[in-house]
Image (cartoon, rainbow, N blue to C red):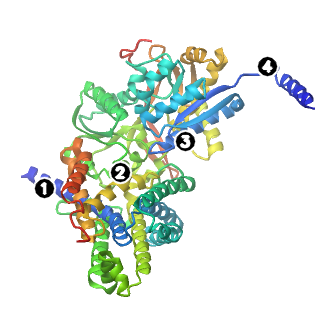
Amino acid sequence: MKRFFAGLLVVLTLLNGGVVRADTKVGLLLPNTGVLAALGTAISEGFLLALDEAGRSDEFTLITEDTEIKPAIGLAKARKLVYQDEVDVIVGVVSSGVLGALRDFIHGAETPLIVANAGNNHATGRDCSPYIMRVSFSNGQINRPIGTWLAEQGVKTAYTLAADYAAGHQMIESFGKAFTDGGGTIIGSEFTPFGQTKDFSAYLTKAQAAGADAIFVFYAGSEAINFVKQYHSFNIKTPLYGSGFLTSPLYVEAQGDAAIGVIAALHYLPTLDTPENKIFVDAYRKKYGTIPSEYAVQGYDAALSLMAAVDAGGNSRAALAQNLPKIRYTGPRGPLRIDPKTNNIIQNIYIYDTVRKNGVLTQKRLATIPGVRDDAAGCKM
Amino acid sequence: MQNVAMDVSFWILQCLNALQYAMLLFLLSVGLTVIFGLLNFVNLAHASLYMLGAYLGISLAALTGSFWWALLIAPLLVMGIGAGLYFTLIARLRTAGPMNQVLVTFGLIFVFLDLVRIGWGDIALGLAAPPALSGTLHFLGINYPSYRLFIIGLGGTVMAGMWFILARTQIGAMIRASVENTDMAAALGIDVSRLFFLVFCCGCALAGLAGVAAAPILSATTTMGITILIPTMIVVVIGGLGSLEGAILGSLIIGFIDVFGAVLMPSFSALLTYALLAAVLVWRPHGLIAARG
């Protein structure tokens, strides 16, 4: 009897295409707890949607680990994924701090990492690695364009505020440099304790008193929600600008009318009018019932890149590391490719305004800065 | 002159910011400290009740269409949850020693955190301030959000009410007597266990009230309980465990240190609170206003 079933299994497998395809083991390394948990959920939703749409969910075995947004825990979980689960590739990492902690380990373990959010400039700059490939964005890539754009709009002075961690510092530094190069002046700057600041009133009062032409900030997740609402409640006259995570489509509804008029920069808007985006938005809405955010797109593109790389040369760690940087296609966010010099993505950056249209908050594109690419900044592959 | 005027209004604004934060801390710490003083019980899950107040408030506001109903009903629901906790866990743990109490109630924080995640999801939820309080009020040459003024008023009212009850009513005298010496109070015919239950429920309701009141400013997040727990504990320790005046003083001190630390020396602001905590523990280990002599 046993033999009969074994035989049946072989026949079925042969009918099923003749070859037994070895599964690709993917470690999904995302925060499931803490202030950025919602981002992790959106990324994994995008990732699953892409596999599902391609009908290839069975080919990929997913092992999920929680970074808790803590660098030490992220590193321990990455070790577990590489040595214990023996994954072929790791996908994820939301926090720049966690990415910084992972870099040397990933490089040494020669296991490819597809970064699906963390924007740490160094990971595709001075600390770049042939095993780290980023399909999301770098902190500089998002903020340089809006710095230049703001200066071009005739804004002379700016006051900056950001969460006090790796990403906050890099975002503000990139913005400040571009804004200053464009002729603007930063007249004041403050960093608020990350993950602990819930009430920004003291900082808002200070920013208002500085009397700049613009307030430019970086906040994401629940900090972004509180910041925008509190800025609005104080009725501050200085206009608010930011990295687009400030009014991300993921949580803009929680901000309500307070988000209207905030101008920000992002690499994806759900309102982009392209056939690729329309298909993506419809599929996402059908599966999850909401509009996708930039985080969902990052997960989606991570899966598309991974599938393309597997098709190009199989799923061994070495083959994936070799083929991932060759990815190039037009996705929901527009044309994208990986820069072989840094392994960072080259993509459009959109400057947008949040408006209310037909009763819902939505993004109105003000400008497109095409093909934004980072400097090699000391990266040697 | 212009500059001086602007400076003055800047400091008035910052004082209001500090006062508003202090009131929120007061609403939370007063329940915690009175429960500790009376029951000798450290209920870390107090922070979860604050979070539940915010989430229940948001759902109730959506259900009833009014913030005011939410502000009224959510604390009562939280009180009900508190009562449930009292009968299932707290009453049994009364004699289990502080370490077990801390472990169990700290565990409860994570249970509630995950229950909230299952029920409401990970994304922070906002609550709109009621229309009457959504603008700013102009006075003394400054504009200040009306809702934040409302919180200051709410905190002040609760403060006055608590003081009146504790200092001027019979039940207040019974509570004070039980805090001072439980055995003697019981010997004098006070039904101590009923009194404990009553005070515990009121403390829980205040935590719920703080949660709803905070939601329009701070949003509801799954981590809000854990984040507020530490400053609340610091208030209680600095003020003196079990003392109402201690909770008032502690909240004001922490509120002002937090805001003025952020304004004057941002890089040290997080450190200042802990430095003060350490200093109080060294010089006045029972807090600035100790409840028991």
Q: Earlier in the sequence, mark 4 or mark 2?
A: 4
Find out whether the residues at labels 4 and 2 contact each other: C-beta distance under 8 Å.
no
Position of residue A195 in the picture relative to residue B89 (left or right)? left
Q: Are marks 1 and 2 on the same chain?
A: no
* Element on which disc 2 rests: loop
Rendered image quadrant of residue B140: bottom left
Residue mark closest to the camera, 4 vs 1: 4
Label 3 to label 2: alpha-carbon separation: 22 Å
Label 3 to label 4: alpha-carbon separation: 34 Å
Q: Label 3 amino acid?
A: Thr
Residue mark closest to the camera, 1 vs 2: 2
Q: Nearer the viewer, residue B268 or A218?
A: B268
Which residue is situated farthest in the left direction here?
B1
* Residue named by callout 4: A19
* Residue named by callout 1: B8
Label 4 to label 2: alpha-carbon separation: 55 Å
Find out whether the residues at labels 4 and 1 contact each other: C-beta distance under 8 Å.
no
Task: Please tell me which residue is depicted at 71% across the width and 22% down the height of the picture.
Answer: A22
* Residue named by callout 3: A41
* Residue named by callout 2: A198
